[in-house]
Amino acid sequence: MDRDEAMKLWLDEIGDQTYSYDFSGKKIKKDDYQIKNEVGWVVSYIRPLELGGKVDKGNIIIMHHRTHEEKGLNYPEFTIDHKSYRVQYEKKDDFYYIEEILEEDDD
């Protein structure tokens, strides 16, 4: 995705904010698209294309570049910074989203 498309996606998803956080809690900065630093970010596919994901808005997500590297092609479950996540699919509106898997407490 080129920079102009990424900036439009940022505006659509995050708004007119300079900083935000990805789903794993890592801080990202609008101006640092595709820069590998403490606040750099990328646009990635929630369901990897290699595993049947589609190239469309319902399958893309903004995430810190380290989150992207750690997730890799893992699907539908993966771990980032010792937290487990699961990809869910909303068939009616045709989009993917990520939920943290919370441990059940026996108490």
Image (cartoon, rainbow, N blue to C red):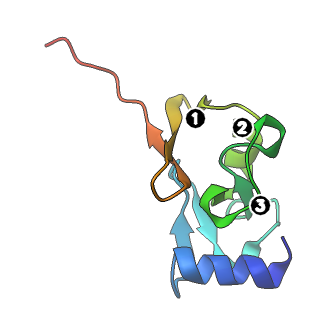
For numbered disc 2, what is the local secondary structure?
helix
The extreme top residue here reads: 106
Task: Give the mark nearer the N terminus: 2 vs 3.
Answer: 3
Contact flag, marks 2 and 1 (Cβ < 8 Å):
yes
User: Left of 45 or right of it: where is 97?
Assistant: left
Answer above or below: position of 83 versus 28: above
If you read the primary sequence from the N terminus, does the residue marked by circle 2 or circle 1 appear first? 2
**Residue under pointer 3:** 37
Find residue 81 and name its label: 1
Instruction: Name the residue furthest left.
Output: 107
The tag earlier along the polypeptide, 3 or 1, is: 3
Gap in Å between the C-alphas at discs 3 and 1?
17 Å
| Residue type (three-letter) at the residue carrying disc 2 | Glu
Give the residue pinned by disc 2. Answer: 70
Q: CA distance from mark 2 to mark 1?
A: 8 Å
Mark 2 is surrounded, within 10 Å at the Cα level, by few (under 14), some (14 to 19) or many (20 or more) other residues, namely some
Q: Is residue 8 in view?
A: yes
Pair 3/1: label in front: 1
Q: Which image quadrant: the C terminus?
A: top left
The reply to whether residue 31 is in sight is: no
